[in-house]
Amino acid sequence: MEDQELIWLERAKTGDRVAFSRLVEAYRRPVYNLAYRMLGNAVEAEDAAQETFVRMYTKLDSYQPERKLSSWVLAIASHYCIDRLRRRRGEWVSLDEEPIAAVLPSREQGPEERVVRSETRDEVQQMVNRLTAPYRVPLILRYWYDLSYVEIAEVMGLSVQAVKSRLHRARLQMVEVAPAGAALTMTPAGAGGVG
Amino acid sequence: MHTEYTLLMSMALDGEAAPDEIRRLEAHVTGCAGCAAMWTRWQALDRRFVAAAWAPAPANLAEKVTARLAEREAQKRRSFWLGSGLLVSWFAVLLVSAAAIGLLALWGTNHPKEVAALLSALAQLLSGGSHALRGIGTLAGSFGGATAALGFGLLIALTGWLALLWAWVMGRSRQWPGLSVSAGK
Ligand SMILES: [Zn+2]
């Protein structure tokens, strides 16, 4: 899979737009989902996804083949979304921000996707929305992309230690700001062992 | 609540805790009510996140990216041409007006009457124009330099013509946003 993508990448470097479109198609879903989870709404997510690919196109020459292509693409997307969140209104997103619910019919899903009840998705997004930008990325990469600390560190350009600490603090932040009676506190039943 | 153990909880949830760390955590949680409550909460949180779906991406994203790339390149080309065009036109105007002033100065010393007639005609032309042009004409005239006034007028007229010409050229390229701005110059 990645071999074919590297061939497209080489062609795209020479200006082959069709090859680049193939790459966009290959990373359309992960990039869009990352943008959506980072920004919390579909309109901004689509714009950010497009911008990510435009940036990727202008940076094709700087791609180093020893790096995983997916890590590189996710890195571009996450850095762009962090910038965008910072520009949006300071570092914090207000707590009463309306979650955008008019999305996510579970059509066209791939193997990584799980079918869930719609209110779970919204609650999860609401919790992500409460985090500051630097904490959103590792959490999203951890849960939606199943990346390990090492892989998250590679995407974010951080040390493994920093990733570990950010995920820890992200969880602390989420339970701190979760309003009383939120989903988190409602489901202690069935909390099993570790694993 | 003990930070050492919440860190272990976080690592355990991420599948990054070693077996002995997990045992240590479980032993602590059985004896610490605060950490036990937190652990329960975090596990519930974890289950919700693990179950979260992917946001479905728009199907035509690749086409939109292609369109955006084309638009960015067109923008780049336009600003290049706009910049270089303005530079070239200013340079041309300066050259032409310098030459005109030189020639008129040479000719005017031998034909003062004609110069006066030409100037009055030009002054009329200028005064027929806008207040700004008239103001500039008067200002230049007040310096007593007949050729300077003429040069000034020529400079303005030429710049206007070149700007219009440039606007026309640029207007022929697709959707030029700066057209109205430049034409009004
Ligand atoms: Zn404790």
Image (cartoon, rainbow, N blue to C red):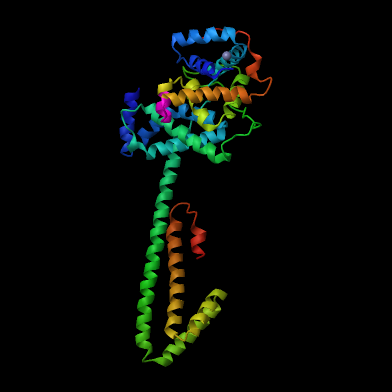
**Relative height, residue B132 to residue B112 (above, below):** above
Image coordinates of residue A174 in percent, x first then y, are 59, 24
Tally the marks.
Answer: 0
Residue A25 relative to residue B56: left or right: left
Residue lying at 42% horizontally and 88% vertically, measured from the top left:
B115
Image coordinates of residue A65 in percent, x first then y, are 31, 29
| Image quadrant containing the N terminus of chain B | top right
Residue lying at 49% horizontally and 24% vertically, measured from the top left:
A165
Residue A103 relative to residue B82: left or right: right
- Quadrant hosting ligand 1: top right
The question of residue A152 being in magenta is answered with yes
Residue B5 relative to residue A55: left or right: right
Q: Is residue B130 visible?
A: no
Residue furthest to the right in view is A181
Which of B37 and B137 lies nearest the eye of the viewer? Answer: B37
Image coordinates of residue A1 in percent, x first then y, are 35, 22
Residue bounds of the magenta highlight? A151-159
